[in-house]
Amino acid sequence: MDKRTAVQLIEDTFNANFNEERFTLFAKNLLNDLEPKSNSYSGNLIWDDYKDHINSYKRIGKYIDPEGNALDVLIVQVESVSKLERARTTLRNFVIKHLSKFEKDYALVAFYSKEDDGADWRFSFIKLEYHSELDEEQGKVKTKKDFTPAKRYSFLVGKNEKAHTAKNQLLPLLQNIANNPTVEELENAFSIEKVTDEFFNQYKDLYIKLSEHFENDEHVKSELKKSNIDNARFTKKLLGQIVFLYFLQKKGWLGVAQNAKWGSGRKRFVQELFEKAKADKVNFFKDKLQYLFYEQLAKERDNENSYYQKLNCRIPFLNGGLFEADYDWQNANISIPTALFRNEEKNKEGDIGTGALDVFDRYNFTIKEDEPLDKEVAVDPEMLGKVFENMLEVTERKSKGAFYTPREIVHYMCQESLIHYLDNALNDDTGNFQAIDSDQTALFGGSATKNGQVKLEIEHRAKILVPKKDLETFIREGHFALENDQRVANKGETKTYQYQLPESVRQNAELIDEKLSEIRICDPAIGSGAFPVGLLHELVDAQMVLKPHFELNYLKNKLDKFGFNERESVNESRYIYRLKRHIIQESIYGVDIDESAIDIARLRLWLSLVVDEDDLDPIETLPNLDYKIVCGNSLIGLHAQGADRYPQIKDELEKQKERFYNETNEVQRKSIRSQINRKIQTVLKTAEDFEGYKIDFDFKLFFSEVWREKGGFDVVIGNPPYVDIKQLPKELVKFLFKEFESTENRINLYSIFIEKGLMLCRNKGVLIFINPNSMLLNSSYKMLRKKIIDKLIQVIKLPDKIFKRSNC
């Protein structure tokens, strides 16, 4: 097929509402030798555990690739648009069940909903996963299907989406009519890495253009200097704000008609606002964006439905700080040339337009962060984190030790930390012995190994409530059992449907939920927030898996804590939103020395809340994260008992921080922040004067509630900076060698973070870090090895060059 015809076919198929005839034509041209099928399933032919999600589905074709791999082409009509967007695991599991029935390993699937007449739909590639294992009895290697046996990659398509990415990645296969595509080639066409690299390069070019403009504009430089804002942070925050608008308009929250529901807004609101600025002959940034940022999104309005008269539409008040002005925007008179938003320049790839809106318009945006088993070929918040960490120049990356952590590793580490935390919290696996005439216990009984007369002893057996193996199944695989177990909980067990979650987990569901609700987590080098966001998702998944097994009274008490009252409908999206908000408020803490990193980490946490707000009226405001995700130096703090010398200040701080977290009034918020900062500075300044060095942060002062409740964090997790000690200022090195016991010779900063991490852990806390293997063998880390050897649970070797950048 010639390029022009192929491009037209892609645009006709993917830039429009779902159409079965067009999709079938596309599939035939993509696969060349597609064997037509006409199997349709609906009503009672849909499996019971999927009837709430799937209306009907069709098998329209079967394909055998040149290597003999069989693939089905399916069309699945889902129950609603929200199911399409949010029930990703369920939709993937549904296709797995189909593939198992027809003994296939691969599928190309169109998912759409009649609710919006197929306006937004998904084109997905799904493959079953296998691994090999040794059968020791027979001495043979067997291939085994995993319990979580599929990966799904999806293009976001439809009349509200751009087919730019799908076109770039599917075009070569359509043009190659001489050869049928292999399954591997089809999978490569759904590559996330390609779109990440492309988006990063264009985002970086945008950043350079904008920052150079601000650097050369004396008026802008002067205004930023007045407010003590550096150019780099201002530029990064501006790009972050614009990207956030793209996520908001994706949800239909911008440009909503006065009496219409949230979600019905204009999907090209930002672009239309730009055109309005041109028509009105005013500056887009100065006269439109600033008002949208700092007046419409940042300030409460005295009306019930968030109506904003200037734009004649509803605009949500979001709170949270992202749209809180760092400068006097109303008097600063900052303008940004139109050409930096839209122009006719060609980029390196030949695309027309290098302005901010030109670039962002090319890509599909999805608010839901990808999971290792379900990835959308689109820009998600996790990708923003990757872009930020890779935007640091090479010299800056080395000095700050900032490296992006692949999501598969984040996912694994987050799950492992929860497994070990729950095992420690629920199980006492240490048996001990006690002589009858003694009140002391010992780990090892003496009588079993001694001759002659021995004392009578009582054996205290280990108390195992939930075996660790069951906890592993629950955390790693529990969400795959959710639909099945929910059905069983509602209708009872049958021959076909039985509980999949381990019995010990079901019987102790409420206790496990309590322990998960009490967890306190910290990343002392948070970067763009990969680990806290990862743990947020894991905690939500785990607690949702437990929910079908709660007694009514326990669930009622939980709903009361989340602020539900009897008049409110407790739909799933609202429940998940409140659950996430509770986790962010109670469980998650993070610190980083880089202010821009803190901005991105907070942005990702806010977006993780926004994704679960459906049909909420009014839209619930975002929390203030100033004292949860904090900019500061994790390694330089107060001396031991430093914060404890100020018990009254700590008590006052805890009360004020609790008020601040939910405060939405701009004047009140600024007042409380000012009071908190004054108290903190009183303590830090006193310590600075005494110690003789700068202190901008202290864990026990900023996060005093954690030590009051628990004596430290349950989980300390992260990818600490890798910085050679020779690159640090001499005064800092001198301080580190004085304060940390494991310092000797020429060490790297990561080893000091390990020691600091141990200090932050409570008794039986879990420390899980990524570190270079130099700590295992290098003589400089002998003291560190001695410090951790008795506490070590596991060491895992990662593949070589796992952190090597591609183009990023």
Image: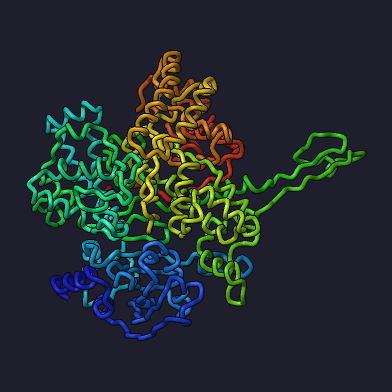
Q: Tell which of 430 and 741 is nearer to you.
A: 430
Q: Tell me if 460 is positioned left or right of 167 in this view.
A: right
Q: Tell which of 358 and 72 is nearer to you.
A: 358
Q: Tell which of 328 and 488 is nearer to you.
A: 328
Residue at image position (65%, 54%) is 466
Instruction: Look at the picture and state if 670 lies above or below 618.
Output: above
- Write down the quadrant of residue 190 in the picture: bottom left
Instruction: Look at the picture and state if 352 lies above or below 46.
Output: above
Can residue 422 be seen by looking at this rendering? yes
Q: Tell me if 433 is positioned left or right of 50 in this view.
A: right
Residue at image position (19%, 44%) is 289
* Residue 273: percent from left, percent from top: 17, 51
> Which quadrant of the figure contains the N terminus?
bottom left
Total marks shown come to 0
Can residue 403 be seen by looking at this rendering? no
- Write down the quadrant of residue 662 in the picture: top left
Residue at image position (15%, 32%) is 220
Query: Which residue is most to the right?
Result: 453
Query: Which residue is most to the front?
Result: 303
* Residue 118: percent from left, percent from top: 29, 71
By what rule are the colours in the image chosen? rainbow
* Residue 202: percent from left, percent from top: 20, 50
Residue at image position (54%, 60%) is 478
